[in-house]
Amino acid sequence: MDTKALRQKILDLAIRGKLVPQDPNDEPASVLLERIREQKKQMVKEGKLKAKDIKNDTIIFVGEDNLHYEKFADGTVKCIEDEIPFEVPEGWEWCRLNNIYNFIDYRGATPTKITNGIPLITAKNVKSGYIDYTIDDYISEEEFKDRQQRGVSKKGDILFTTEAPLGNAALADIEKFSAGQRLITFQHYGSKNELINYVILMFILSDFFQHQLYVNKTGSTVAGIKAATLKTLWIPVPPYNEQVRISNALNSAIKLIDSISESKETLSKIISSTKSKILDLAIRGKLVPQDPNDEPASVLLERIRAEKEELIKQGKVKRDKKESVIFRGDDNSYYEKFFDDKERCIDEELLFELPNGWEWCNLSMIGTTNIGLTYRPTDIIDDGTIVLRSSNIVNDKIDLDDLVRVKTQIRDNQYVQPNDILICARNGSKALVGKCALIGNMEEPASFGAFMAVYRTDYYKYVLHYLRSNLFRNVFNDSNSTAINQLTQDMLKRAVIPFPPFEEQQRIVDLIDKLLLQIKDIERSLN
């Protein structure tokens, strides 16, 4: 179930007057808006508002020709039928946001923050529908009083973010606070029986209102909206009694959706944890039982080593001087040996005991790895060679919807082959480093980008699951502290893998695939 889409559907029904039934006995919203206009005029007389604060107020009405008109403060009238977003029910009215809310904007000097005092709510705190107090800033009592001269934000007011990010809104839910930068406080005019802020807040969070923000935003890098523009945006106003019914219906529906969303999130975490646990059990030799009749992994590794030496002797492959091998010494400890014959004990790096028949090795001992193709933007053409990138790994599969093709010289080892494992080796997000997928049969030759790596092995089915385990993630999570997150060739080659007998690898892979298929069915039902 897509709870975000469901939430928006309910908000859309509410803002169009389709969530609760209308009652012809309700006082029309036109009477409510007239009272607000009279209230604002009285506030000007009392000096609580300035004349300029109401000079842009307009009245939206339906003429005798059944068309919508807007009457301005100077008495002029304009037909705005083409501007009306959609038809609202009988008793509802369209208005500009400025007509029902006073805008309090704390622009000016950056407040001096202190460790304790009056809470300062900023754009960082205001999320979509709630305020996050884990980010806590405070100002002094003196500065609070100074800021009050520009307007007093109150509990129940709507706090709206004008940029970074644009369009978040929430109700102020504490008695004493000050609103910070990039926030505007919407404070409604009139008595409590004029507007229910919760209903208008939900309207503001609807796709309809958010779309108005999008088409009127300024800036490309940081989207924002000017207060003068914000004041002119459309908002439909229901009769007060209908607002009460809408509020009750929305409150019940949103609570139910939040409950579903929390349950879904909890279940998603359980599923993610279950996947990790399955892989963890698999690479520790605890997912399937061992069979003493299986050929030990040590024999398999010795055969792999002998075959590689023969290929080197025949000149078919070159010896990689950066390779290292893992072996158990006479003292029963594990060592890593390098090409220059240097050795180091790695017992402390091996986190658990292996079952009988298993061996520790590194990825360079059982396969080969290559870093991909570097190309320039000018090399990209429509009919060039496919270059696989991080964006081509979607949900653990190769996705060919977003392809880049290039014309440039490509070495033989930069072409992919069926059953190669494509790995994201470098990315601005550490979470994306290490994501991988198995390459199937490509319909045409394909290479892979410089921020990617390809690992090639006859034992790709088991190795693929190892690469998705937390054990492998520790290879770059613990050792990489550079600004750009990356998995280097050396880190990949020397990554230590628990290696089972080949027959057990097949049993492990079969069971993992079966379990993950069942989990996928559960995930599908959630969506």
Image: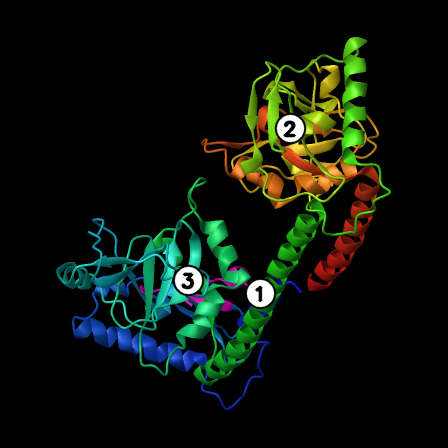
Q: Amino acid at mark 3?
A: Ala
Q: Amino acid at mark 2?
A: Asp
The answer to whether the residue labelled 3 contacts the one labelled 1, judged by CB atoms less than 8 Å apart, is: no
Q: Nearer the viewer, residue 173 or 203?
A: 173
Q: Nearer the viewer, residue 274 or 435?
A: 274
Q: Amino acid at mark 1?
A: Gln
Instruction: Give the labeled residue for mark 1.
Output: 8
Q: Dot 3: few (<14), some (14–19), or many (≥20) neighbours within 10 Å?
A: many
Q: Disc number at residue 350?
A: none
Q: Is residue 452 above or below residue 223?
A: above
Instruction: Give the labeled residue for mark 2.
Output: 330
Q: Nearer the viewer, residue 182 or 194?
A: 182
Instruction: Give the labeled residue for mark 3.
Output: 169
Of the numbered discs 3 and 2, the one sitting upstream in the chain is 3
The answer to whether the residue labelled 2 contacts the one labelled 1, judged by CB atoms less than 8 Å apart, is: no
Which residues are drawn in magenta? Answer: 68-86
Where residue 197 appears, x then y in whole percent? 40, 73
The answer to whether the residue labelled 3 contacts the one labelled 2, judged by CB atoms less than 8 Å apart, is: no
Q: Dot 2: few (<14), some (14–19), or many (≥20) neighbours within 10 Å?
A: few
Instruction: Check if residue 77 falls in the magenta segment.
Output: yes
* Cα distance in 3D space between marks 2 and 1: 67 Å
Q: Is residue 240 above or below residue 125?
A: below
Instruction: Check if residue 298 falls in the magenta segment.
Output: no
Of the numbered discs 3 and 1, the one sitting upstream in the chain is 1
In front: mark 3 or mark 2? 2
Label 1 secondary element: helix
